[in-house]
Amino acid sequence: MDMAVPILAGPTASGKTELALRLAERIPIEVISADASMVYRGMDIGTAKPTQAERATVRHHLVDWLEPNQLFSVAAYVRAAEAAIEDVRSRGRIPLVVGGTGYYIRALSEGLFELPEPDPELQNRIEQELQERGFAAMREELAAVSAADALRVGSNPRRLVRAIEVLRRTGIPPAQAHRRGPRFSYRKLILWPQWDWLEPRFGQRTEEMFGRGLVEEVRGLLERYPRMPTALQAIGYKEVAAYLRGELGLEAAQKRVLQATRAYAKRQFTWFRKEPGDVTYLPRGGGEAWEGLWAWIRSEGLRYQA
């Protein structure tokens, strides 16, 4: 039987990229990204994407894979990630799935719900309805039928539109659709740092992003891609776009980015707390988690030689 594919997950700013790069110094890994925003080209600063130099050292799959105006579904992610895993293994290397997008990790490791292909015309009508009725009312409609789907949607309008579309077309919410089993087996290590350790990192990251030129990055993206229906929902990009449209001051936009990051991390903790499968929780993050990560890699079923 093929060895299980390791997954390194955890909340935003917990140090997943740092640990993966350090691990690559010891064993021949290639990273399979499980991040819904890093997939887009040009979205570098706001996603804390690994640098070109880091990616030259460790190959990253599904990073800089699409243009920001392209739609990307969880089904497309699973297909691409499975192909990347097979490719990495075919070359005698170790695929390591790394990321914090919980629904990507869940679909990849637990199986994919078989849903109809998106209907752009219906989605446009639902988007218009969303503008008229408001996000909360539409999410309540979904939650009344499927609490699991409402949780997965979080505060993301694109996910809400897709879930409502599936519900109205099939009469069944996405979480109750037939699930195709995963192609590979997986073992998951989830970083689980204390909140008082993690929260200060949100402010540091936000200041660094604006200091490195997040506003200029978003301005350039909007000039090249006036319509970015999925990419523009990413934290940092949505708030800065509002600033550039004159809807927020710069300080207010920065504050909203920090608030959105904090809220997203809380949702990630809620999501990963119920993660199914072979899961190990590591109560640390960043460099402090290294010894636990290395012990996990060397444990039964993951005995890779350096």
Image: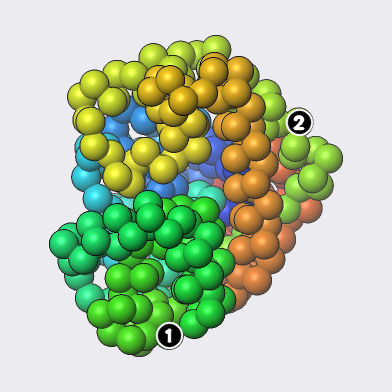
**Whole-percent x, y for residue 229 in the image:** 29, 45
Residue indicated by mark 2? 200
Is 281 on the left-hand or right-hand side of 57? Answer: right
Question: Can residue 77 be spotted in the picture?
Answer: no
Quadrant of the rendered structure where residue 112 is?
Answer: bottom left
For residue 300, above or below residue 63 = below
Assign a secondary structure to mark 1.
helix
Q: Give amino acid for label 1.
A: Gln
| The one of 256 and 27 positioned closer to us in this rendering | 256
Mark 1 Cα within 10 Å, few/some/many (few <14, many 20+)? some
Q: Is residue 115 left or right of residue 240?
A: left
User: What residue do we see at 33% from left, 60% from top?
Assistant: 129
Mark drawn on residue 176: 1
In this view, the residue farthest toward the front is 132
Point 22% across, 76% down: residue: 116
For the point 24% across and 61% down, the residue is 125
Depth check: 270 or 293 in front? 270
Q: Is residue 63 left or right of residue 266?
A: left
Residue type (three-letter) at the residue carrying disc 2: Pro
Quarter of the image where the N terminus is located: bottom left
Q: Of the residues tagged 1 and 2, which is closer to the observer?
A: 1
